[in-house]
Amino acid sequence: MTDVLVGIENLSRDFDVSKPWLNRVLENEEKKYVTAVNDVSFEIRRGETFALVGESGSGKSTIAKLIVGLIRPTGGQILFDGTNVATRGSASMRQLRSRFQMIFQDPFASLNPRWRVKDIIAEPLRTFGVAEGRAAWEKRVDELLETVGLSAKDGAKYPHEFSGGQRQRVAIARALSAQPEFIVCDEPTSALDVSVQAQILNLMRDLQDEFGLTYLFISHDLSVVRHMASRIGVLYLGRLVEVAEGKTLFRDPKHPYTKMLLDAVPDLEMTGRKRQPVEGEIPNPIDPPSGCTYHPRCRLANDRCRSEVPVLKLHGDTKAACFALEEGRS
Amino acid sequence: MSDALLSVRDLVVEFPTRKGILTAVDRVSFDISRGEVLGVVGESGAGKSMTGSAIIGLIEPPGHIAGGTISIAGQRIDNLPYEAMRRVRGKRIGMVFQDPLTSLNPIYTIAEQLIETIRTHMDLNERQARDRAIGLLDQVGIPAASRRIDDYPHQFSGGMRQRVVIALALCVEPELIIADEPTTALDVSVQSQIIDVLKRMCADHGTAIMLITHDMGVIAEAADRVVVMYAGRVAEIGAVRDVIKDAKHPYTKGLMGAIPTLMQDSDRLTQIPGTMPRLTDIPPGCAFSKRCPEAFDRCFVEQPDCRPYQGRDVACLLYDEGKPQ
Amino acid sequence: MTMDSERLKPPGLWARFFDSDIWYSFTRSKVIMAAAIVTLLIFLGALFAPLIAPHDPFDMASLYLMDSLTPPMWEAGGNPVYPLGTDDQGRDILSAILYGSRISLAVGFASVAFAAILGISLGLLAGYMGGRVDSIIMRIADVQLTFPSILIALLIDGSVRSIFGGIDREQSAFYVLVFSIGLSFWVQYARTVRSSTLVEKDKEYVQAARLIGLHPLRIMASHVLPNVMGPVLVIATINLALAIITEATLSFLGVGIPSTQPSLGTLIRIGNDFLFSGEWWIAAFPGAALAILVLAVNLLGDWLRDALNPRLR
């Protein structure tokens, strides 16, 4: 089954980080841009959980916002079920919007503190006209609250009366309310405690089974990704360096960065495994290294890595962007 | 345990609020030996940071220590006047906080901050203090330390800044470092570097570390022993290996099951139902009783004490003599 | 979750208000309670002036010139019919103060409302839209700030008079005052609302609303606005005191409310003429009333600012 729901093609996004005009003129500086997302292509299949992992500055949250249309791409396109999402303003866009939703990282910021929970959950379904009339949407909100493990009575409360985990349940109920097919989850559990994280992750899996949802799951936490994702893309400084099936990636990582990342995960099993000390730090994205952006931290780097940009190529079942792999230097 | 460097006994921290007194830390006892890394783990609101603040005497009013003792190398420090406590804090206890940016003063260079701290507490001249500062930066793994020492905090990356903070904490060779979520604001790859630095410092200088974190992974990597806290109370204390591999307290068991790992292949994580009670409505008896799958009658009325059991201390009535059956 | 179902029905609006930190801090300070009571008394006095005032100072027919310049009742020559004495036309000072604060408060409220509506709308637009809209609005605000508010009021009053020379001054004075005071106060609202909006618009609940394709105006009104109103309330309270003073100043200068329907400022101006001839009560009592009102409202505003600021709690 290779039914593609979301196709990302050569997606790029620059951010203007220049100083204000007057400062630029006085200090005689050029405009400065950060390329947060650089020529990223991947596809998300219907019914799967595709995960994007990366550290800070990798562009993973920018990709999430690009896909749901919160920001516009500088280049490339996003196809949702064959329709280009970037062409906005059309009548079909409204219809398209109701088919995807987003769950945000911080449940303390993602719910309007002045609104009652039932109004928060009802907003998308009233906007898209899923439920007509007060009685209909109130009934639907009650159902949604119970679906996410809260009680229908909780609808009359305000967000501050809930704990972090319960708020994230409310956010999930809101995301589900307009019956979307595709949900972008931007670090949905990173603000939560472990025991609550487990509840939310389990809930998300149950909902996926129940409603046949497709997830784009964005996280910096490899063990969470391992638990949730069917396929994984690894981002480094705005570029996709490796894409693989979840199991394959963890068993047999190809790209040197992926290997380093896996190695750095704390060893909770206390197996006492030996590991390479991590070298260097993520470079400043305003002034990224030439060629393969990972080369200053890579043991396998040579002159080609320093000058040429590698592209994703198939190595076994895995796609990776690395010259060392291509040339068999690893 | 007379050889303990830090000894906390029945520590109680209370916050008077208009709705009554809130007990943020409830009769917590533990020891840290010289050169040991003691992990303190718990969810938000479990009282782990509050315990750290109590030890360094920096609880924000109206909160206050309402009972128990804290002593460092046999000397009580919980009842010291402010000035004396300030000296202890500077000289014998160092601190590393979660956000390295706020623990460094942005308008002074690293050199100025390190040298000031060193000269406040040690009898060294400017030159010697500077050499010592460069040596410390070198030890915590800052490349080209002699050149970078004159940079300002904002010129360092997050990971490098946290190294500077560790160097700052080490300046005066404290006997104890309290590290409150030192790696939480950092990326995974940087996190493992910082853990390595902390562990090396501990080994090289014989400094004891109290490592406060919510992340069991960090504990597994760095700590020798671990205190598991829940709702302001100690649930379990033991060697890291024992606690992680063979947890006894039902809360610790649940917590371990809830963490997804790189190895396991299960579809569902074990989850603890509900959430930690707010400090305003902790149930009578065991604080965990309402969420505990193994709770029995006594758990709802009787608050368990921390008792030794199979080489660790557990606060659970399951391991009490009076257990049913 | 079993724990959730045990919770009780959420409390109503009033119950939540009396349980809130604001109400708590209110009950803890005697000064604030006193200020609130004084403000309330003046408000009620102004509101029910026709019912409680011993005389109607606007009813020319009821004035006796014989009674003009009567001192307060406890002075020699005082008359208990006029507890605080009378002015040069025989108007009862107490009644004039009650009616006068009615006008002062009306001008105050109306101009604050005008300034707030203008400032909040422009601040929301500037903060939410950003870019060129933001630059234009905020530059206008900057220019506006370079003129003192009295000057603006004088300018507007002057231009209204020269443009609409023929209109009835008694009718227009109120609106001219409201417009000119409001216009000189809006910048503060706009700036505050703009900076809060900049913070709020990046929060995820606003992104969630954008995600479902709501119109920006709708997001501003129903999502951002309720969350930036806290500081606005504080400014509005403090501005009310300021507006009352500005009105008094303008009336004192003679460009405000005409003396046929005196506000507190007009009363003070009238009294000013008699200060040196010994009839001190004509200026002193309206002046004291103005001072007490402004002080009470200011105290309330200060307290509200502290109570709403989580960092000071």
Image (cartoon, coloured by chain):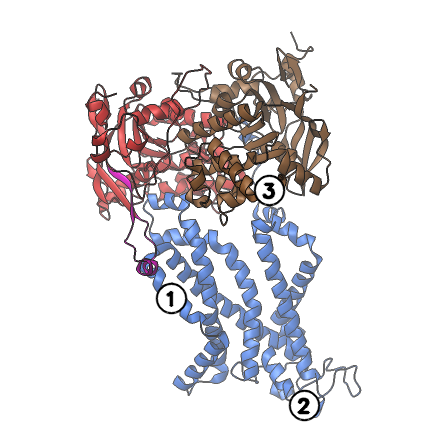
Chain colours: A red, B brown, C blue
Residue wearing tag 2: C64
- Can the viewer see residue A163 in this picture? no
Part of the protein shown in magenta: A16-39
**Residue C287 is drawn in which quadrant?**
bottom right
Which numbered dot is residue C139?
1
Q: Chain of mark 3?
A: B
Q: CA distance from mark 1 to mark 3?
A: 51 Å
Label at residue B119: 3
Amino acid at the residue labelled 2: Tyr
**Chain name for mark 1:** C
Given the image, on which type of amino acid does mark 1 rest?
Answer: Arg
Q: Nearer the viewer, residue A144 or A298?
A: A298
Q: Are marks 1 and 3 on the same chain?
A: no
Evaluate if marks 1 and 3 touch, with contact meaning CB atoms under 8 Å apart. Answer: no
Q: Judging from the image, what secondary structure is the residue with disc 2 in?
A: loop
Residue C172 x/y as whole percent: 47, 80
Residue C3 at what x, y percent from top left?
Answer: 55, 28
- Residue appearing at x 43%, y 65% in the figure: C118
Q: Quadrant of residue A36?
A: top left
Q: Work out whether residue A268 can be spotted.
A: yes
Please check the rendered image and state whether residue A17 is part of the magenta-colored stretch, yes or no.
Answer: yes
Mark closer to the chain start, 1 or 2: 2
